[in-house]
Amino acid sequence: AFNWTYTLGVGLLDPWRHGATALIVAGDRPSAIWPGVIERARATIFAAVPSVHRQMLRDGDARAARFSSLRHALSAGETLRPVLLEAFTRTTGRPIFEAFGMSEISTYISSGPETPVKPGSPGRAQRGRRVATLTPEGRICDPGELGILAVHRSDPALFLNYFRDGEATQKAFCGDWFLTGDLASIDAQGYVWPQGRADDVMNAFGYRVAPEEVEAALSGHPGVQEIAVTSVPERDGVDLITAFVVPANPETFDPGVLLAYGEKVLARYKRPRKVVVLAHLPRTANGKVMRKRLIDETRF
């Protein structure tokens, strides 16, 4: 995957196109340095993945005065949880605008000054783009109906094909629509509500459950710093929804309390049956949680 497209586009090409300055920080970059870097450089935009925003608030001297030059922050690469969005806005007095995309098209959904933030949604299709959700039969979904997020073939930023793999290219399209593999719904105002990758969907008691939905609900618990959810094989034919948690305070975190919290905020079939405590979540180079790697954590 072109995990550098966010950095290249937002960090370098976009500022240069508008005659702005791109700030490059060399050497070690612990999360605690960013409030000071922003303050000293009088930076106007700070772009990062959500985990960096989260760590900066946790480890840095994140007083509102240090962000006085900042117009807003940008986020992409992984899901921006409403709890982090609220904490960042409350601490800095500035919003985070989110972008959503993939290697085949870069970002194509976003929020911004003209697209007000709705917590839990990365925004609407960018101007000039045609985006829809499709049923398995290829029908365009109604507003609010869950389907596969798709981009029309006419989009000038869409990739041409997978290199030397005509079969994969053909499978990626349904008529004139490129299938992203992301589950989502689109509301009547055009806001997109992602529910994770289609191949990450869990089966619980015959119901299909999106990990993103469970993660969003449980991330509201104050004892949770980071969370990822997936189904883990327990015995032949039986998978259990399992929550992998990086606690805000490992010494006081109680998995039973989180399971009880899940009973209040989730339907019975969506609740995790098990909690695994981790020091950190396994991630790809561009910050995405490696769900399949999580299953390995239960085997030791």
Image (tube, rainbow, N blue to C red):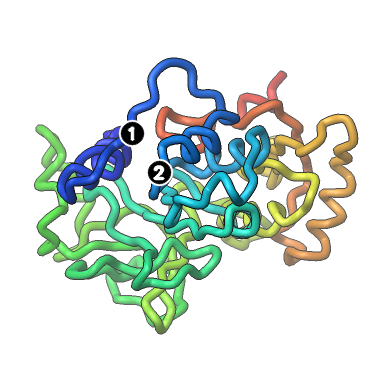
| Identity of the residue drawn at 9% across and 47% down | 160
**Quadrant including the C terminus:** top right
- Tell me where residue 225 sits by quadrant: top right
Horizontal arrangement in the rendering, residue 170 relative to residue 145 (left or right): left
Q: x, y (%) of residue 253?
A: 86, 38
Amino acid type at image mark 2: Ala
Q: Are marks 1 and 2 in contact (CB under 8 Å)?
A: yes
**Quadrant including the N terminus:** top left
| Identity of the residue drawn at 11% across and 41% down | 166
- Residue 43 numbered tag: 2
Amino acid type at image mark 1: Leu
Residue sitting nearer the eye, 172 or 283: 283
| Identity of the residue drawn at 23% across and 45% down | 20
Horizontal arrangement in the rendering, residue 53 relative to residue 221 (left or right): left
Residue ID for mark 1: 23
Which residue is situated farthest in the top direction here?
27
